Image (spheres, grey):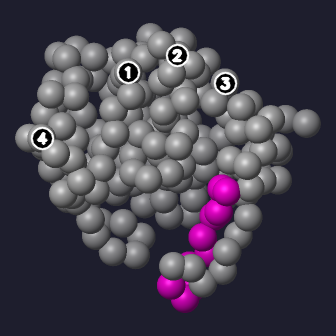
Amino acid sequence: MELRDLLESRIRDVPDWPKPGVVFKDISPLLADHQVFGALVEALADQCATDGVDKVVGIEARGFILAAPVAFRSGAGFVPVRKQGKLPCATYAESYDLEYGSATLEVHRDAFTAGDRVLVIDDVLATGGTVGATIELVRRAGADIVGVSVLMELGFLGGRAKLASLLADTAVRSFVTI
């Protein structure tokens, strides 16, 4: 079975959560399956090797779950991008809109060394707001984005098109497109 098929088989729909009309994509069954979760981490780590990554950024909260083991497996550093007010030291902040609200993300100002090659990992690419804000934070901190990888892309929300203007020739990879 192909990786995409394995991943799709372990993502469940939760209708009307967190609010009516939204179908939440729950990755808990995927994370609980050692074989499928491991295959995803390995595929992401392969991308790190291909791109020569120094740091892997995980976006709060489910992006942490994916990015931390990828960083460890790849011999790269892990950098969390967190919701506003969660980091203890000086930060850069970026506000953005998402599919059902708005938010602000932060990263420590000293999280990167100038010229670090960074892979951004998150669970979902929806409207592109969260990933777009993260790209801006990484760049403001002096690092270079060499790729964006997401477990799943909600293609009907147009996030990839929004990121195209921010990334030029940088790859946006998704394992599952819905």
Is residue 150 in view from this perspective? no
Q: Amino acid at mark 1?
A: Gly
Gap between marks 4 and 2, in whole Å? 26 Å
In the picture, measured across the screen, residue 16 lies left or right of residue 9, that is left
Magenta stretch: give its range: 19-28
Q: Which residue appears at 65% of the width and 56% of the height?
A: 27
Q: Quadrant of the C terminus?
A: bottom right
| Magenta-drawn stretch contains 108 | no
Gap between marks 4 and 3, in whole Å? 32 Å
Q: Which residue appears at 78% of the width and 45% of the height?
A: 33
Q: Amino acid at mark 4?
A: Cys
Q: From this viewpoint, which residue is outermost toward the bottom?
A: 20
Mark 4 neighbour density, 10 Å: few (under 14) some (14–19) many (20 or more): few
Q: Amino acid at mark 3?
A: Glu
Q: Which is nearer the N-term, disc 1 or disc 4?
A: 1
Gap between marks 1 and 4, in whole Å? 18 Å
Which residue position is annotated with label 4?
Answer: 89
Task: Give me the disc on residue 77.
Answer: 1
Q: Amino acid at mark 2?
A: Ser
